[in-house]
Amino acid sequence: MRSEIIRYLNKIEEDNHVKIIYACESGSRVWGYSASNSDYDVRFVYIHHPDYYLSIDPIGIGEKRDVMEQTPHHLLDFVGWDLTKALKMLRKSNPSFLEWLYSPTIYVEKFKAADEMREFTNTILSPQICLFHYIKMAEGNLKNAEKRTDFHLKSWINILRPLLAAKWIEEKQTFPPLNVQLQLQELNLEDDLNQIGRKLLAREQEGLEDKLSLFSDYAKQELSLLLTAAKKRTKKPGNYTEDFNAIFRKTLKKAWQEEV
């Protein structure tokens, strides 16, 4: 599948006259609980030709979108951001983009742009912003899981992941590893809850339904505590706009130096 993914990334470059500077795997395949039929969630960052940016119409407005979304078939999902959007998201300490940067499965990495962005992670990281992101995600997924009349394993896994991510950020003050099993190993949870988490990630349904009320009560209590902690935080990301402008200009020059 890797070769097919890279071939399609090359096709995106040719069809859209862009350079893909970074591409990675996201989703369950890097979170540590994929099934045999899980799709491949490919996320990438691209940069246009310099002429595209030298325009009276800014990118991201109207027809000049800063996002690409393509699904060549049911197992492949591609979403890409223009480098300008990616840098804006990094400036906001956006957890989704931080997950892209720290994916263990990388398909494309060129011009050192991703490395340069990673160098800012510790200084740009806002625990409050990340906590709000994962808390909101967990709360929404919990409400959806409780509305279901049937038992759907993935619904409960989708509560566990953001809950543990938020707990990691609050306890360790760092961005969490993407692998949820690693988070489960490193965080201090009660034995019953640790066991429920392991069963969820292993997709072991036997005896699990009876314990979900315990997990639901724990999640609600923990999310309430995490939300209180998040509201007390005041640190805001610093202003690194000029640094990110430099990354953009440098990458633009490297990517298109033979054609400019």
Image (tube, rainbow, N blue to C red):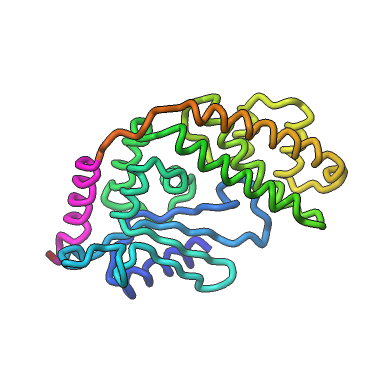
**Segment tinted magenta in the rendering:** 241-259
Q: Residue 241: where, in percent of width, then height? A: 24, 42
Q: Quadrant of residue 52?
A: bottom left
Q: Residue 223: where, in percent of width, then height? A: 63, 34
Outermost residue on the bottom side: it is 15
Q: Main secondary structure of the magenta part?
A: helix
Q: Tell whether 238 sits left or right of 221.
A: left
Give the quadrant of the C terminus: bottom left
The foreground one among 234 and 210 is 234
45 shown above or below 142: below
Q: Is residue 243 magenta?
A: yes
Q: Residue 204: where, in percent of width, then height? A: 79, 46
Outermost residue on the left side: it is 260
154 shown above or below 67: above
Q: Residue 86: where, in percent of width, then height? A: 34, 51
223 shown above or below 258: above
| x 49%, y 54%: residue | 25
| x 48%, y 67%: residue | 4
| x 18%, y 51%: residue | 249
Total marks in image: 0
Q: Is residue 248 magenta?
A: yes
| x 57%, y 44%: residue | 136
The foreground one among 223 and 125 is 223
